[in-house]
Amino acid sequence: MHILILGAAGMVGRKLTERLLRDGRLGKHDITRMTLQDVVTPTKPANASIPIDVVASDFADAGAAAPLIADRPDVIFHLAAIVSGEAEAEFDKGYRINLDGTRYLIDAIRHAGGGYKPRLVFTSSIAVFGAPFPEKIGDEFFHTPLTSYGTQKSICELLINDYTRKGMLDGISIRLPTICVRPGKPNKAASGFFSNIIREPLAGEEAVLPVSEDVRHWHASPKSAVGFLIHAGTMDLNAMGPTRSQPWIASRARTSPRASSGCPIRPSSASSLAGRATSSPTARSSSASPPPRKRLTTSSGSTSRMSSAASSQANVTSRFFTRMRS
């Protein structure tokens, strides 16, 4: 089996690659080859027992998709995208990458000919839904996205459903929640602060909480996200009918009740928050021995060390989540 991962240099892409190489199989099929693509060159795994090609290309270029599927990968994991906050701030870039890139991909599959019909696993988002939210989101809950990012993901879902209905590919879209805790520096996702308020205090740094303390949100760990993708790549989709979109959500969590301006997070509070917001073993073990200085501030109580860029992002996030709750 040949597997293609688009967006392989990202956090989830790297972890998916590691898991597939470790398992050596996807479902009942041995993995015999992998292609890893991203806008930057993905790191080629060392000591792999199968051929692995790494490709650096702009996924949204009209001619980028055809070479990627020229060798007809059996399963395509489509993780390539720009995140919610960036898609909202940069309108043209968001539609170019999140929508046009996907359209070029499925059109390349369509025109490949010879009965080529790969499994396409598309990473959609809970941003396709519109507020107000019920306690549980059912399969029939309406799609009225409140952001450009959610709109782009929703359009891609519909395209994949239609191409699947027409027999051009075997697609499924999974609506991922916020994945946390993400390592490293914050990205431009509107929900990125959910990782920040766990990761930064555990490293002895201040974090900004740009939303009300009673905000509730959906989360999954990186390990769970990889599990969702693998399940989507192997499950029998025939029983689903023409609608190939699934909301896979691991947990729902509140922001910390101690997340008030200038309030230090004690070890017990930090550990409790990490346990509620993610199933990541790393986050839980880190919280057992937190560094001595841990402080969380709201956007209204942010310190002078908060950069103007961070302040701007906090304001965007606050407006976004206010709209999501309305």
Image (cartoon, helix red, strand yellow):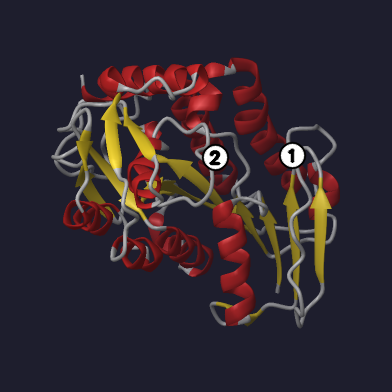
| Residue under pointer 2 | 162
Mark 1: which secondary structure? loop
Residue closest to the eye, 8 or 2 = 8
Give the position of the C terminus as an image quadrant.
top left
Residue 200 position within the rendered picture, expressed as x and y whole percent measured from the top left? 39, 45
Assess disc 1: are there few (<14), some (14-19) or many (≥20) residues with their C-alpha within 10 Å of its C-alpha. many
Residue 52, compared with residue 70, is above or below; it is below
Residue 135 position within the rendered picture, expressed as x and y whole percent measured from the top left? 14, 41
Numbered circles on residues, count: 2
Residue at 27% x, 18% y: name it: 300
Residue closest to the eye, 108 or 43 = 43
Res. 217 visible in picture: yes
Amino acid on which disc 2 is placed: Asp
Residue 304, compared with residue 112, is above or below; it is above
Amino acid on which disc 1 is placed: Phe
Residue 116 position within the rendered picture, expressed as x and y whole percent measured from the top left? 74, 58
Residue closest to the eye, 310 or 21 = 310
Res. 323 visible in picture: no
Picture quadrant of residue 19: bottom right
Assess disc 2: are there few (<14), some (14-19) or many (≥20) residues with their C-alpha within 10 Å of its C-alpha. some
| Residue under pointer 1 | 59
Residue closest to the eye, 313 or 29 = 313
